[in-house]
Image (cartoon, helix red, strand yellow):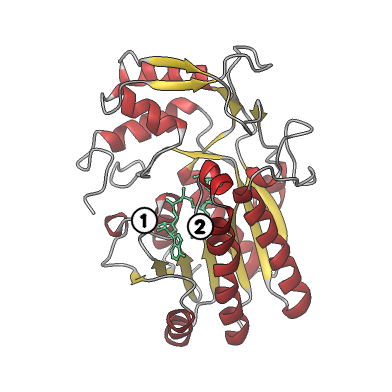
Amino acid sequence: MSQGTLLITGGAGYIGSHTVRHLLEQNERVVVLDNLVFGHRAALPLDRVTFIEGDMADAALVEKLFAEHKPEAVLHFAAFAYVGESVANPLKYYRNNLAAPLTLLETMQRHGCKRFILSSTCASYGDPVRIPIDESHPQAPVNPYGASKWMLERVLRDCDTAWGLKSVFLRYFNASGSHPSGEIGEDHNPETHLIPLVLQAAAGQREHITIFGTDYPTPDGTCIRDYIHVCDLASAHALALKFLREGGDTIAVNLGTGRGFSVKEVIATAEAVTGRKIPVVFGPRRAGDPSELVADPSRAMEILRWQAAHLEPREHIDSAWRWMNGAQRGHYAD
Ligand SMILES: NC(=O)c1ccc[n+]([C@@H]2O[C@H](COP(=O)([O-])OP(=O)(O)OC[C@H]3O[C@@H](n4cnc5c(N)ncnc54)[C@H](O)[C@@H]3O)[C@@H](O)[C@H]2O)c1
């Protein structure tokens, strides 16, 4: 049921734009704030959302937004998310992922807005000490990207103590797939995620896909990840919002399927879906890549009543391939 207006930061990005669609289908009123550093105006139905192009660190702009739209809750997607870049340039990540949201939080406090949904990450756990990973797993991030999210979780808990801000930290595993319409999808530049890279290789947009490491302690020697469909992430946000509206307390929730698939399995599935041979090059392991990351999603089921609907990588790849073969050919015009 729709209540107040929702502020979606980073709503023109990959996961944000899918969530915007889902919330509109639920008759929610949505304001998107995105500086379009990585997002795309074309990912938004501009006739149905209020889109404000700007930076969340712009205090005057955010104040004006809150004064005009009086958002009831904030769904916070805006962040930088390149792990390697975060190691090379940590301050860029702490500035945008940790410092910039403080402006947002100060404005929320002034306006009495007390609901927050954070796009957090399995990278906040660091190297897993057990699989599957539940929310009580130690958080020991091994790169500034994961640390920036982990620190923001801490900031949000302190805001709860001080002024009653209630947050859901949604710790996503590997987001993948596209909206079934094929109208929106994943368009990152540069792209670092496995499924779009594999499909770009299948489409001849890149020469090959590199597998980093074939000597991991996994059945086929390649890394195992838990792929969560972007539409399942979107539905989890709506349920997290419901949870907060019903008086839910601050909580961390994993979003994954609980099933892991190796890099080689993903490539074989992509070959089956596309009917094309995908050229593969074998490279060395990358520093900081754990061999296996798989979620225990039981808390999301218990607390949010959420369950992933797309369990098979085939479905993820199928929808992503539809996006790549749709009118936009996997890339927005803007
Ligand atoms: N994609 C994944 O697998 C994954 C996994 C775990 C967590 N996450 C988190 O989910 C969120 C969304 O990821 P995504 O893949 O959709 O990324 P994305 O880059 O597609 O979307 C992020 C959006 O935020 C915007 N943005 C960044 N900084 C901003 C700022 N200062 N002000 C206003 N807008 C700003 C960008 O322009 C972009 O549209 C991020 O917070 C990311 O860390 C993603």
> Crowdedness of circle 1 by 10 Å Cα count: few (<14), some, many (20+)?
many
**Residue 114 occupies which quadrant of the picture?**
bottom right
The vertical placement of 24 against 179, above or below, is below
Disc marking residue 268:
none
**Apparent side of residue 268 relative to residue 299 in the rendered image (left or right):** left
Identify which residue is drawn at 60% across, 63% down. 98
Q: Do tag 2 and tag 1 residues touch (Cβ < 8 Å)?
A: no
Q: Is residue 248 visible?
A: no
Along the line of sight, the residue nearer the viewer: 33 or 299: 33
N-terminal of the pair, mark 2 or mark 1, is 1
Identify which residue is drawn at 30% across, 34% down. 322
On the image, numbered disc 2 is attached to which residue? Answer: 79
* Distance between the alpha carbons at the discs numbered 2 and 1: 11 Å
On the image, numbered disc 1 is attached to which residue? Answer: 39
- Disc 2 under 8 Å from ligand 1? The reply is yes
> Crowdedness of circle 2 by 10 Å Cα count: few (<14), some, many (20+)?
many
Q: Position of residue 88 (x, y in %)?
A: 55, 46
**Residue type at mark 1?**
Gly
Q: Position of residue 95 (x, y in %)?
A: 56, 63
Q: Is residue 224 visible?
A: yes
The vertical placement of 203 against 295, above or below, is above
- Disc 1 under 8 Å from ligand 1? The reply is yes
**Residue 316 occupies which quadrant of the picture?**
top left
Identify which residue is drawn at 59% across, 50% down. 145
Task: Look at the numbered disc 2 and give the secondary structure of its residue.
Answer: loop
Q: Position of residue 34 (x, y in %)?
A: 40, 65
Task: Look at the numbered disc 1 and give the secondary structure of its residue.
Answer: loop
Along the line of sight, the residue nearer the viewer: 216 or 19: 216
Identify which residue is drawn at 67% across, 52% down. 147
